[in-house]
Image (tube, rainbow, N blue to C red):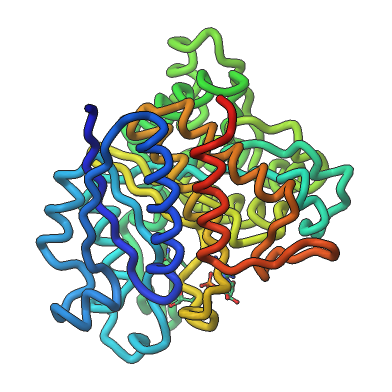
Amino acid sequence: MKKYRIAVLPGDGIGPEIVREAVKVLGGVAERAGVRFELEEGFVGGAAYDRFGTPLPDQVMELALSSDAVLLGAVGGPKWEPLDYSVRPERGLLGLRSGLGLYANLRPVVVFEDLLDASPLKPDIVRGIDFLIVRELLGDAYFGKPRGVRIENGQRIGINTMVYTETEIRRIAKMAFGIAQTRRKKLLSVDKANVLEMTGLWREVVTEVGRDYPDVALQHMYVDNCAMQLIRNPVQFDVIVTTNMFGDILSDEASMLTGSLGMLPSASLGEKTAMYEPSHGSAPDIAGKDIANPLATILSAAMMLRYSLEMLEEAALVEKSVRTVLKEGFRTQDIRQEGAVVVGTAEMGDRVAEKVRTLPA
Ligand code: NAD
C-alpha cells in the first residue's frame, strides 16, 4: 500500500476545527484510493509559543522538511498580539515559508454555481470563473535592498527596491507553464513593463521560457489593466503568473469575486515540501463554536492531492464532493442563503467525507 507522510499543523483559533474536517476528508480519500496517509501533528503559531516559547519549534520544521506535504490551519489571535514581533505567531508561518523555500503561492479562484449570490458582482459576470493566480513569493520589493527610511537633506526618504534575478523569474515561469499545461493551456503574465525596467526583464524571461512550452498560449498584460479586467471580464482568465507585490494585490482583489473567504484554498510550492492552507486567518471571533467554514481547508487538501501527491482523480473527487454538498443545499453560517440548511463545521466535514466515499467515479 502506498504511504504518504503529511505534517498536520492546526495552529490557532479555528485552525484545529477546520483541519480536523480536512483530515476526515483525507480519511475518505485513503479508503477510496487504497493508500495510507501517515499524519503527524505539530504545534505552530501561538499554540507552539504557549508550549515551547517559540512559534516554530525546531522539531516542527524538521517534521515539515521530512514530510510529503504540510497541511496548515491558521495562526494568530489577540492573545499573542502583545508579544515581540520575533515570537509572534505569524513568524512561525514566515519561518515555514522560508525554511521550505516556498517561492510560489497558488490561489485558485472558483465561483461555485450554487454560491453565485455570495459575490458582490452580478451573477452574469462571475458565472463560470475558474482561474488560478501564481504569485512569486520570495522576491520583489518585499525582500529587495536597499530598503528603509532615512534622513537625507533634512527630510525623511523612504526606499524599497523591486528586484528579480533572471533565475528567480525563470523558476516561477516554468512552474506556471507546467500548471497551465494541466489546465486550459492559457498563461497570462502580468507586469508593468511600460514603466518598470525590472518587469520588462520579467516579460522577456517569461517569453523565453515560453519557447519550451509551445502548447501553452502566452499573453502579457499590464497590472493596471489586469486589475480592471478582473472585475470587467474575469471569466477570460485561466492561469495568471505575476510578481510578489502585484500578486499580493491581485489575489486579494480576485478573492472578492467569490465573496466568501471561507471557500478559498491556497498552496505554496517551492524547492522542498509544499504547504497547503486556507487563504483566511484564524478567525478568533468564531473559534470553538462549530460555525467555521471548513471548505477552504478541505479544498486546500484537494490541492495537496493534486500538486504534492499526484492524486489527480482524488483531488477532483474532493472538489466534486464539495460542489455536491453545496448543491444539496447545505451551508455553513458564513455562506448561508435563503432556503438552505445551515450546518456546523463538523457536519459539513462529515458530509463532504461521506461524498468522497460514495460518489460514483
Ligand atoms: P480572518 O481571516 O481570521 O477573519 C476575517 C473575518 O472572516 C472574521 O469575521 C472571521 O470570523 C471570518 N472568517 C474567516 N475564516 C472563516 C471561516 N473559515 N469560516 C467562517 N468565517 C470565517 O482575518 P482577521 O480577523 O484579520 O485575523 C484574525 C487572526 O488571523 C489575526 O491574528 C491574523 O494575524 C491571523 N491571520 C492569519 C493568517 C494565516 O494564518 N495564514 C492569515 C490572515 C490572518
Position of 295 relative to 124 (above/below): below
Position of 351 relative to 188 (above/below): below
Residue 180 point in image, percent of width and height: 53, 24
Q: On the rendered structure, is 21 left or right of 111?
A: left
Asked if residue 29 shows in the view, the reply is: yes
The quadrant in which the N terminus is found is: top left
Asked if residue 170 shows in the view, the reply is: no
Q: On the rendered structure, is 99 left or right of 136?
A: left
In front here: 168 or 337? 337
Residue 80 point in image, percent of width and height: 33, 86
Position of 216 relative to 242 (above/below): above
Q: Residue at x 67, y 36 (%)?
A: 130
Q: Residue at x 23, y 77 (%)?
A: 86
Q: Residue at x 61, y 37 (%)?
A: 320
Looking at this rendering, what residue extends furthest in the top direction? Answer: 214
- The image quadrant that residue 157 belongs to is bottom left
In front here: 271 or 5? 5
